[in-house]
Image: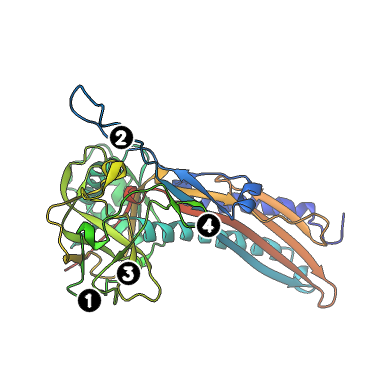
Amino acid sequence: MGSNAFTKEEKVLFAEQVVEAEDALSMAGLVDTKRMDLTDQQRGGDSFWIPRPYIQTSYDGLDQSTNFAGKVQLSVPVRVNNMKSALSELDGLELRDALQEKRLFKAGLEKLASDINLSVINTINRWGSLFIAKTGAASGFDDVADIATLLDQNGVKASDRQLVLNPRDYRDMASDLSKASRSLIGDISTKALRQSYVGELAGMETFRQQYTKNQAAAAGGAGLTMSTLFAGGNVWTPIATLDSGDGIQNVDSRRQQVALSSNAGVAVGDRFTLADCFNVHPITKESTGELKTFVVVELVAGSITDVVISPPFISALSPGEGGKQYQNVADGSPAANTALVFLNVDAAPQNYFFHKEAICLTPSQIMMPEDAGMSKMTATLKNGIVVVALKQAAIGPAKVQYRLTARWGVTVLAPEMVGSIAFNQVP
């Protein structure tokens, strides 16, 4: 065993702290996990593509001779793009306290767990296209029922629906449920009163998260518009691949670059609707009567008009079989200057709802050889993420350096199955 080797006591200590870190992975435990071979990750540039489910079309009548057409299968890129390290060092005097290593392992693993949770939150906040703006404070069942209705209207399966609330809004919901005037089954009201407990509501399991994203108020100028005419270039034609001149490449089906009358003040995370552009059920293509919501996922560098939105704008004007399959908007009156209405009108902490399979966590890790002059330990968390612990001594300063490293990716596969609800939004 080399001079840098972890002792048996250190290995036991690390294993104990990893168990506690797993309990802190609150957000990461609510999403799906998709593993990818490490060699394939390296050779594929830390990304791979997942096909989206087909949406089939149907036709009336006996003779279908003219209706046969190849189906368009869209896909989504899954990327490993997060790596965090918690670093520390102890000198020869600090090492006299045997508890120092325990405290450093604990703090480092807690920080990595927080980083993983935050990456899930940031990804949801960027890509989740569904949005509910409530003018008042969180009030319990009615708010969750609105979320469940919106998910129903978007064809989201009833199982595995999650709702993550920030501490203040969770408290407000629990307060509403604790009111004696409520007629609730069993001990829901009592648990809400004594334990600030919300639990399952309207078919959704609720969770309290210590921190969520605080989304700023939309600052886009009044009177912004977007063309919804096909000739305006903003009506997306769903395609699976694109010939870029350097070969056939997959197309990210979650995003579309559109031109606004101006992008001044527009920010990533802004949610908006378009006048007279209604959401449709993904299978029936019937209008839900609710305006379709879009989220800004990127600002186009150097442009004064262009932004990237999710989901793409696919109306009845979208041509071909792909347009029939994936239409998501009933545009009642296409126009060159359709008005945008921003929904996040006041800064507020967000609350997230989603179907578990709509978001995936992709584990990865760094590889370090055993004989590289340092000691290594690894631990695999329940969700597959590997934490690599490294230790190396430096003779000059009489110090021992420690490094805890985790690597992973988070991807929203279906933006129309993911969203947020914000309270106290007063137009």
- Marks 2 and 3, how far apart at CA: 32 Å
102 vs 417: above or below: below
Could you classify mark 1 by the number of other residues whose Cα lies within 10 Å: few (under 14), some (14-19), or many (20 or more)? few
Which residue bears the numbered disc 1? 221
Residue found at x 18% / y 68%: 426
Which tag, 2 or 4, sits closer to the chain's start?
A: 2
Mark 1, mark 4: which one is toward the viewer?
A: 4
Q: Which amino acid does label 2 sit on?
A: Gln
Element on which disc 3 rests: strand
CA gap, disc 2 and disc 4? 32 Å
- The reply to whether discs 2 and 3 touch (Cβ–Cβ < 8 Å) is no
Q: Quadrant of the C terminus?
A: bottom left
Left/right placement of residue 426 relative to residue 364 reads left
Q: Say which quarter of the image contains residue 270.
A: bottom left
Q: Mark 2 points at which residue?
A: 56
Task: Give the residue pinned by disc 4.
Answer: 246
Q: Can residue 402 be seen in this view?
A: yes
